[in-house]
Amino acid sequence: MADLSKAIYLDANATLAPLPEVVDAVVEHLRRPLNPSSIHQYGAYAKYVIEEARSQVGQYLGAQGAHVVFTSCGTEANNLALRGLGQATHVFASAIEHTSVLQPAQHTGAKTIIPVLETGVINVEALEDALATSDAPIKLVSVMLANNETGVIQPLTDVVDIARKYNAFVHTDASQAVGKIDVDLEVLGVDMMTLSGHKMGATQGVAALVFQKSVPLHAIQWGGGQEMRFRAGTENVAAIRGFGVACSHLVRTTALFQNLASLRDQLEVGIAEISKESRVFGQHRWRLPNTSCLTMPGVKHETQLIHFDLANIAVSSGAACSSGKVDVSPVLLAMGISKEIAQTALRISLTPASCREDIETFITAWRQLYHMQLTKRHLAEVRANQELKQHA
Ligand code: PLP
């Protein structure tokens, strides 16, 4: 078994360790038999716990009047948002959405993929053109608040302004944004928002879809009438309690993440000093303060991941799927990056525990692999030249 105490974790966008306060609250509630559907006092207490967490979510998002429906994960919340408006919905989703948005959109009336610019920002003109040509009775625009791979933040208020002209609902997957930047449902003006517990200091196994009461949403799974009939299934009371606690700490969590921008910049400057050829995607856009998606020219991400893992540094290609296979990032391809370059990209996502030494260790490991690659390239060139001379 690996000794995790020695590892440097730079993969916050994959998952975060829950806050200590969350762990305490979850463990305390795991010890009790809590089913909010029960009529006795345990049930009443469980109901109270859930309602308190609901109010903490609403309070954080400035969305006291909205519905907050707890789900098991961000994926489920996205599925509910995408499919809950019914079969006739025409979905307009950006090309860089998470698969938990893009795949359920395939099961609606129609799906239009809106391209992104080279900067990783949605092409709002293309969105407007697409909406203008649709006569679907229900239109739903789904654009994430921040991208999981590049960290690029999307112009949601522009998206909402355009959507309103065409009577379209707007959903935003804020899974990566909540806890890293300030998020306010009313300021953004969206109709629905996804939050994922394990990306914002709560535990795995809990998430939420927050939506305005004017949205005609229906459940997509059937059974008991839990969660105001929007999500059947016994609630994960302990995890929901943790979710509420994480929400009550989000202002502090966000401040900690905001402080990471200078470390992230230090990392990018360090890499640029080693290689002028390396590239940071979305670098000049408004990005999550903890995220950097950069290339190591000539070195495929599989090789990089193994190298960093051996150096006790946990990073990600950003496009790893559940099978552990590393794919070429559809996000980078959508930004017009060639397959060859996209295959050399790595995502580094800092956590509030990241420090200067972690960045220095990462840069040293990066330099080592890059120089090994340069030496290999140089030797191959020398060999090729020798062969040419021999045959001349
Ligand atoms: N949306 C985005 C942008 C994500 O990055 C992820 C997970 O990586 C999800 C949704 C899925 O969230 P969950 O892991 O809670 O299902």
Image (cartoon, rainbow, N blue to C red):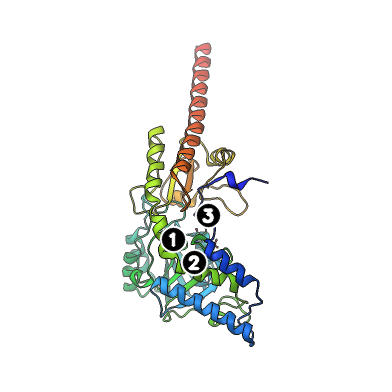
First reached walking from the N terminus: tag 1 or tag 3:
3
Q: Secondary structure at mark 1?
A: helix
Residue 253, labelled with which disc?
A: 1
- Which residue does the numbered mark 3 point to in the structure image? 14
- The answer to whether the residue bearing label 1 lies less than 8 angstroms from the nearest atom of ligand 1 is no
Residue at 34% x, 52% y: name it.
285
Graded by Cα atoms within 10 Å as few (under 14), some (14 to 19) or many (20 or more), the crowding at tag 2 reads many
Q: Amino acid at mark 2?
A: Ala
First reached walking from the N terminus: tag 1 or tag 2:
2
Q: Amino acid at mark 1?
A: Thr
Residue 246, labelled with which disc?
A: 2
Percent position of residue 296, x then y: 46, 37
| One can see residue 64 in this view | yes
- The answer to whether the residue bearing label 3 lies less than 8 angstroms from the nearest atom of ligand 1 is yes
Percent position of residue 76, x then y: 55, 68
Question: Which residue is most to the bottom?
Answer: 39
Residue at 50% x, 53% y: name it.
12
Graded by Cα atoms within 10 Å as few (under 14), some (14 to 19) or many (20 or more), the crowding at tag 1 reads many
User: Real-space Cα distance between discs 1 and 3?
Assistant: 17 Å
Of residues 189 and 386, which is closer to you in this image?
189
Direction from residue 93 to residue 79 in the image, left or right: right
- Cβ atoms at labels 1 and 2 below 8 Å apart: yes
Of residues 388 and 240, which is closer to you in this image?
240
